[in-house]
Image: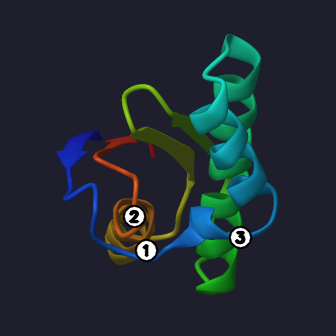
Amino acid sequence: MGLMSFFKEAGEKLFGKGEAKAAQDAAAAAPTPENIAALSKSAGDAIASYIVAQNLKVDGLAVAFDAPSATVTVSGTVADQATREKVVLCCGNVSGVAKVNNMM
């Protein structure tokens, strides 16, 4: 468990397409609390989908993104330390993510 820092501008461009892109554009145009919340939700969903696409088995996977702080909080249960580390790296290897709060 713990908080890890990453380079915010490096990594996969998950927020540049689909719902995440629309939410990002809306939040940039009008940073209302509703638009920021929509961006946080769609970004968290995109990161969770990315973890699943990497074939990492996490029981009870929960991914939340806080747009103002650029922080991902990830929780769930994994079989081993190697999988835990890969999940955290997947979260941090996303452009726009500065920190990962590992609650696994």
Which residue does the numbered mark 1 point to in the structure image?
Answer: 83
Local SS, label 3: loop
- Front residue of 73/23: it is 23
Answer with left or right where residue 35 lies relative to residue 36.
right
Give the mark toward the camera: 1 or 2: 2
- Of the residues shown, which amino acid type is indicated by label 1? Thr
Label 3 to label 1: alpha-carbon separation: 27 Å
| Label 3 Cα crowd, 10 Å radius (few <14 / some 14-19 / many 20+) | few
Answer with left or right where residue 30 lies relative to residue 78.
right
Q: Tag on residue 66?
A: none
What residue appears at the point 43 percent right and 70 percent down from the top-left corner? 90
- Of the residues shown, which amino acid type is indicated by label 3? Lys
Which residue does the numbered mark 3 point to in the structure image?
Answer: 17
In this rendering, is residue 1 above or below 56? above
Mark 3 or 1 closer to N-term? 3
Q: Tag on residue 95?
A: 2
- The answer to whether residue 94 is visible is yes
In this rendering, is residue 24 above or below 12? above
- Front residue of 74/36: it is 36
In this rendering, is residue 38 above or below 92? above
Local SS, label 1: helix
Mark 2 or 3 closer to N-term? 3
Q: Are marks 1 and 2 in contact (CB under 8 Å)?
A: no
- The answer to whether residue 61 is visible is no
Residue 38 point in image, percent of width and height: 75, 33
